[in-house]
Amino acid sequence: MLSICFIFKNGQRHYISNLYLWSVAYRTEGLYRGDVDHDRSIYNGKEFFIQRNISYDLVQASIVQLLESRYKLHTTFAMVRQSPDCDFIIEAYHHKRIENPEQLYQQVKEEFETFINKFIDAMQTEILSALPSLKHLPIMNDKEFRKKIITRQLDKKPVTLTLREIECLNLISQGMGSKEIADKLYLSIETINTQQF
């Protein structure tokens, strides 16, 4: 069982889940107020995290207890995938409390990534219908790009700078403006402003 929270860079959020009854209550009864684990400071830069290791306030703790008692669901782990367009918090649930959720994550992550990718692909029409203003984003309309984000396969090519770019950065660090740098390097100011060396 799972839920996926899409957290877009414009602040908009969208939730999908294969837990229909839980999802309805989550939105209509205000259970989303327990989403402390969707705070960027908690998940940023992580591959996954374990929700029960988070300190909840009294309201959030009571919501977690309600979800566990009413639906017999325990959050096992949250897989995190980040892209320039959108962050994904993908929560996995189980009917009983898992004693070693970190180990479980390591054991199932590749299969879970494959499943999540297929799940989002299958929900594509509904997601785009719900978020028409975000259709243009690569994470929304490029299946291969999304798959690379979900499976952590996106090429992370190191940024390499030319000697001219390094020289320009050095002059900027000395407090020079575009005109001064252009004069010093015998380049046009347009070249400096567009960083085309």
Image: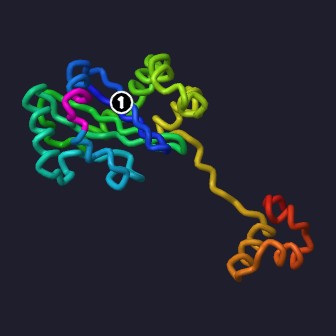
Tell me if residue 127 comes above or below residue 102 in the rendering: above
Quadrant in which the N terminus is drawn: top left
Q: Quadrant of residue 114?
A: top left
Q: 10 Å neighbourhood of mark 1: few (<14), some, or many (≥20)?
A: some
User: What secondary structure characterizes most of the magenta part?
Assistant: helix
The residue drawn where x is 49% and y is 43% is 10
Element under label 1? strand
Q: How is the image coloured?
A: rainbow
| Amino acid found under the numbered disc labelled 1 | Tyr
Tell which of 28 and 50 is nearer to you. Answer: 28
Q: Position of residue 51 (x, y in %)?
A: 23, 45
Tell which of 88 and 176 is nearer to you. Answer: 176
Q: Position of residue 86 (x, y in %)?
A: 48, 40
Q: Residue furthest bottom?
A: 174
Tell me if residue 88 comes above or below residue 70 in the rendering: below
Identify the residue position indicated by label 1 in the image: 15
Q: Quadrant of residue 6?
A: top left
Q: Quadrant of residue 113?
A: top left
Q: Is residue 157 left or right of residue 46?
A: right
Q: Which residues are magenta?
A: 26-32
Tell me if residue 37 comes above or below residue 20 in the rendering: below
The residue drawn where x is 18% and y is 43% is 100
The residue drawn where x is 23% and y is 41% is 33
Q: Position of residue 21 (x, y in %)?
A: 21, 19
Q: Is residue 113 left or right of residue 173?
A: left
Q: Position of residue 49 (x, y in %)?
A: 29, 47
